[in-house]
Image: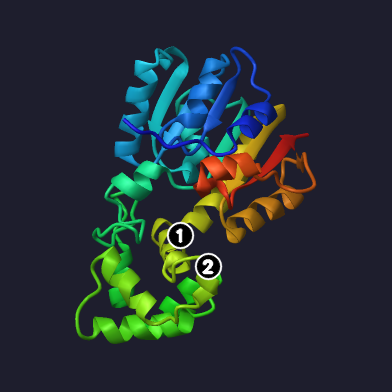
Amino acid sequence: MDYHEPVLLNEVLENLKIEQGKKYIDCTLGDGGHTIEILKKGGIVLGIEVSEEALARAKKRIIELKLSDNFVGALGNFKNIKEIAEQNGFSKVDGILFDLGYSSYELDDGGFGLSFLKDEPLDMRLDKTLGVTAADLLNMLPEDQIARIISGYSDEKMARKFARAIVSSRSLKKIQTTKELADLLRSETSPGYEHGRIHPATRTFQALRIAVNDEVANLEKALPQAARLLLPGGRMLVISFQSLEDTIAKQFGRSARPKVLEVTKKPLIPTDEEIRENSRSRSAKLRIFECA
């Protein structure tokens, strides 16, 4: 079975300062790549995962590697990190990790409709208890609101044009699949869109993922809760993949109570070697905070 390659793994392990028998929280367990390496170094890990399927995959992998004795898996959203941590005996910890990217499984094989590279229902909900899908948003919201979502969550310059095309298209037939949306957005752009660097649907899909899963609000709720779980000297690491999330993390570090200090002036980024080996790491930024 193929598993997601954890991003900035060496940097995460070095900066979490893992010690035998100390407790850590992985707020975005995914396939367990970061957690497994923390467990190998003797850490005790609470892994939080919003997707039931992903949690089951990670648990199975950790059991097969005979690392399950020091692992606790919890199904839930990291916006509730304080409650989840306290319920599982992790009310005070030495390290917390947020990896805000999507795993390869979620993008490629999970059937979530997160990627325009596969033709799937336009869902995008990682948590299936959420009521509204991406298709619901596109087929129900007025043009202005669709444009605000696309622009606000991705800085897409063609947000207004894309929103107008979506509303026009849905008047004839509801937009229901990732391919339908991707093809529509491509048809609205010239071959020179972004000088060919990215697909015309890239930023719109990003914006819809953020909107459907309420990612901005969840992160804003989670960071102060996480800081209060840290022991003095404990560290919180945030890996982001787009500017809005990175800005939230940076601003949090400047205003957090209890006080957390950013360890490095600038975020760490992947090496050229890592980007060559894992192209999905190219936009990753790692911010490191320490509890005063």
The location of residue 34, given as percent across then percent down, is 52, 30
Depth check: 112 or 270 in front?
A: 270
Residue 52 lies in quadrant: top left
Which-is-in-front pick, marks 2 and 1?
2
The CA distance from mark 2 to mark 1 is: 9 Å
Query: Residue at (40%, 43%) from the top-left corner?
Result: 104
Would you name the residue on which mark 2 appears?
154
What's under tag 1, amino acid-wise?
Answer: Ile
Crowdedness near tag 1: few (<14), some (14–19) or many (≥20) residues, C-alpha within 10 Å:
many
Residue drawn at x 76%, y 43% as measured from the top left = 262
Q: Contact (CB < 8 A) between labels 2 and 1? A: yes
Choose top left, top right, bottom left or bottom right for residue 48.
top left
| Circle 2 residues within 10 Å: few <14, some 14–19, many ≥20 | many
Residue type pointed to by label 2: Ser
Q: Residue at x 41, y 34 (%)?
A: 31
Which residue lies under the disc numbered 1? 210
Give 76 or 71, whichever is nearer the viewer.
71
Percent position (x, y) of residue 156?
A: 52, 73
| Vertical relation: 85 (above or below) 150 | above
Residue 141 in sight in this render = no
The secondary structure type at the circle numbered 1 is helix
Which of the two residues, 29 or 129, is positioned nearer the viewer here? 29
